[in-house]
Image: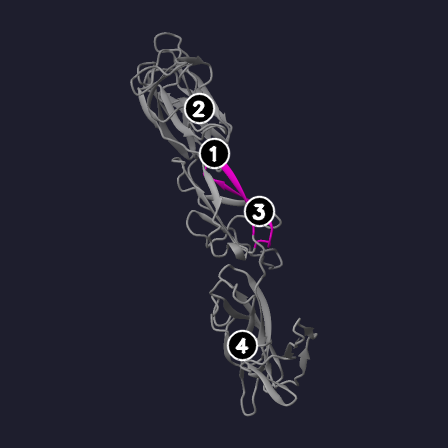
Amino acid sequence: MDQCGGIVTQTVNVRPYNRPYAQAWGGTGNCNPMPNGVGEIGLYVSGDGIGPYSATITNNCGAPVINLSNVTPNTATYINNLTRPCIYTVTVEDGCMFTSTFDVELLPPAPEVLGHYNYTNCPNFNGTQFIQTIGIGYGPPYSPQPPFTFEIFDASNNLWPGYPVTQGSSEIYQALPAGNYTYRLTDACGATTVLQPFSIQTYLNPTVTVNTSNPCFGAGQAVVEGINNNPLSPLTYQYQIQSGPTRVGEGPETDSDPNTGKFSSLVSGGTYTFSFYDGCKTVTTSVTIPEYDQPTFEVGYGAICPGNSNSFLEVINLQPEGEIVEPYVWRIIAEDSDLFTDPLPFPNSNGQTSPVFANLPPKNLAQEVATYQILGNDACKNSYLGSGKIGVLPDQTLILNSTNICPSGNAIIRARTSTPLAGGTYVYYKDGVEVARSTMLF
């Protein structure tokens, strides 16, 4: 409030304040002075709190207390030349005098105190042997000193060819055939790991094909099938279009069967290259999509007969006849009727196999013409959008195409109405005599 009585209100959200987050890890040791040498601790303090940060390091071995008055947050700080064996208690304090405390033990060099790790990597591009990574762990509790000696033994406890290997770096990478192995590591101070077993599994290169027996292959759909022989990631089946006239870089549809990749609406006659990745390697295959025609249809006009307030639409003339991969489904996705109240898409998002949409109203009570947009899909995800109308019966005309004279001298005339009617029966006359009757359009 100011001296005139004016008041300003402001809301301040105060988040919970936590103790400073700190962690420690081992570092590089030194073999001297013998026999125990000295170790190292790495310290990290998160800067999420309020600084400045300080650290106090006490111990149980009579070594001097270490005070760090200004610890830089979010940066590693190393404290070396630490006596071992010893347990060090690290206390970190922030600017609000909140503290975090934890213990770090440092051990002298001895058998089986050397930290280590190992994991299996994918084979090289041209190989099928997995590559084993074996590395030195920097503790705590033991801080190693390079160089390091690596030994790998086969199942009969024989040294693997080329070993032992002594080097300054802390990791080796060895391609190995399938089998059981052990390894042992030693640092410059004589500290060793346990004799650590590990296994290498068999890897086979992946393969990939396009299922040409898929009923939709001739309708613009490719189902890609890979074979994964990778025990490191047996559930990895990643597919993609690498090249082609459309959809380059895209993955398969979400409704693909397990471990396969379905790609629909591909270009008729187009050549596509598909890739399959098994978690280690990528293989490709190419295929040309057979030429095909996208299905099309018409929608018969829904004429409202006298005394009625609605009518029906009927999908007719689905083409190419005899080549549709069933089921073919339809749904109404848009309309301009003021009287239609059902949610869209109608009857639902899955559509219906019946070509008839019953009890549809016109645009308004004056029975002006309403337009309904109908989306159709075959079983291969090829779609076509047609429109149908509901309203008073329009004027009709007969449309004739060119006359074709056959070798026999007979003529063929094809005829159709200008506005096909839903549920209509078409009767054709020549010189007043009925010559044809059909519910289909010619």
Helix, strand or loop for disc 4: strand
* Sequence order check, earlier mark of 1 and 4: 1
Instruction: Tell me which segment is drawn in magenta.
Output: 266-289
* Sequence order check, earlier mark of 4 and 2: 2
Q: Which residue is mark 3?
A: 272
Q: Nearer the viewer, mark 3 or mark 2?
A: 3
The three-letter amino acid code for the residue at tag 2 is: Gly
Depicted 421 relative to depicted 233: above or below: below
Q: Looking at the picture, how far across and down is residue 79, in whole percent?
A: 45, 20
Depicted 359 relative to depicted 171: above or below: below
Q: Nearer the viewer, mark 1 or mark 4?
A: 4
The three-letter amino acid code for the residue at tag 1 is: Ser
Q: Which residue is mark 4?
A: 314
The three-letter amino acid code for the residue at tag 4 is: Glu
Q: Which residue is mark 1?
A: 46
Q: In this view of the protein, which residue sits in the foreground, 98 or 342?
A: 342
Residue drawn 59% across the image and 70% down it: 386
Outermost residue, top direction? 34
Q: Which residue is mark 2?
A: 42
Outermost residue, front direction? 408
| Residue 139 magenta-highlighted | no
The three-letter amino acid code for the residue at tag 3 is: Tyr
Outermost residue, left direction? 156
* Sequence order check, earlier mark of 3 and 1: 1
Distance from disc 4 to disc 3, alpha carbons, whole Å, reads 37 Å
